[in-house]
Amino acid sequence: MNEEIPLYEGRMTLARGSGAVDGTGQLKWVWHPDPIVRFEWRPDPTQIFHPLPGNYDVRISGYQDSTGILVGSFVDSNRTLCIWGFLTGPIREWQPDAKIAKLRFHVPNYHNYMGAPIAYPDGKGCPGRLTFLTEDWRITLDQAEEWGHPSNFEGLHGRARLEAGHAISHAGLLEKADGAPFCWADSKSVLEDFRLFLSFSLGRWTAPILFVGTDVGGKEACQWDSARIDRCNDRYSWLPQYPHSVQPDMTMAWQGFSALAEAWNDRLAVCLEWYLQASRTDVPATGIVFAQAALELLFYLVIVEPATLRNVENKLVFSDTLRLLLHHCKIGSDIPGGLVNLMAVAKQSNWIDGPHAINEVRNSIMHGSKVDKLIKSDTLVLNDIRQLGLWYIELILLYQMGYVGQIVDRRIGGNGRVISPPWAPGR
């Protein structure tokens, strides 16, 4: 956990403008201060190099050039100048049009879930496989043996949560559904959508990293790039995880999410940015503001734009727009009984439902004249309202995805019971 991962060691050239200096170096994946590819480089003894912080081309024979930012230098124990910095762009061994048969990757800090059975090389097994299918692509995600069940603080998953650390938790495989080879450029869109989907199902940022492609002849080539990855902690989402013995229908969820990503384009990424900011912040009031921003964007995407109801947002207060959105998505607006702190304050304040409560508290946050009321607010109440906003966002997105599988009931706090969504058959 938190250990650096060596990627490359050998000849490396740093170039800036018309000048280039040869030397030897190494690339390694580091987790701190942020997950990124770091380079360390030493010029050849015959080369003269005066390090200046800034952007350089990082050149390795057999790889496409990458951009690196030189951060600093030091003299090692052998009295040799050592330069270090971070890559700001990808570096890969293949051309964009090279044909790939399979693309392997790794995922850090993902859920400890129940999936289909998989067997490890040592003969042990675990219910840790998820499969994501679309008409064009197949993605398989396998849980690492050290990450899996049981989820206690002695295992890797438990220690990563306890220490808010980083670890490779899963290995993934991307293939064309019909087994045909594909180009790296063809896979970029599906991998970006998959990054967003993984983060949405996790409740914090994660991403596929450390790619290894295999061509039709069996030759392997790598690509390394930085990624946005949050530390492992107890942020919850709609996806059931251990100890729940529920295997979610990830093909259904993934197909719905992919269709939504195609329809909403970059606006889905914006919505997820606000959703995840609302989830990951330790300040409930900040989370409420981000949650409302996501809900207002969802109202526009779900209600206003499809019906061309121009300027309708300007004629309704937020609580009214949220009620319309919830009704459209077959989601109740009553304050959930499990949010006991919010229920007590709502009764005293005559808040009639969840949208009313979110609207009132958000106004207290955003308007200076009401800041005294906010300061006196119970943190537990603010967190209940944040949880309610996150619950609404998750349900609205899942409804738009057409998902009817099992989800975690966020309304009772923490990693609650598993239920069917309100619109599922039989509810």
Image (cartoon, rainbow, N blue to C red):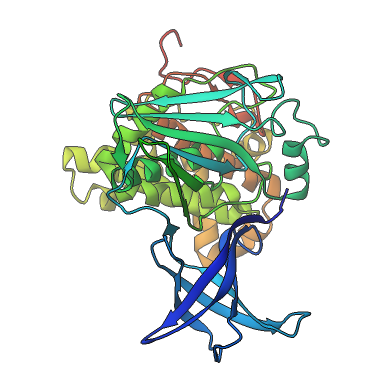
Q: Quadrant of residue 32?
A: bottom right
- Counting from the top left corner in percent of width and height, residue 221 is at 44, 48
Where residue 38 appears, as percent x and y from the top left, is 58, 66
Query: Is 224 positioned to the left or the right of 165 in the image?
Result: left
Q: Nearer the viewer, residue 145 or 6?
A: 6
Q: How many marks?
A: 0
Find the residue positioned furthest to the right: 154
Reply above or below: 41 against 222. Answer: below
Q: Is residue 218 left or right of residue 41?
A: left
Q: 285 above or below 153?
A: below
* Horizontal relation, residue 196 to residue 248: left or right: left
Report x, y in % for residue 238: 54, 31
Left or right, residue 378 beside residue 54: right
The reply to whether residue 425 is visible in this rendering is yes
Choose between 346 and 56: the one closer to the eye. Answer: 56
Residue at 39% in and 40% down: 322
The percent position of residue 411, horizontal first and vertical second, equals 59, 30
Q: From the viewer's side, name the closer residue of 288 and 194.
A: 194
Q: Residue at 65% of width from left, 44% of height from top?
A: 381
Residue drawn at x 63%, y 56% as measured from the top left: 6
Q: Is residue 228 above or below residue 254?
A: below
Q: Residue furthest top?
A: 426
Answer yes or no: is residue 334 visible: no
Rendering quarter of residue 387:
top right
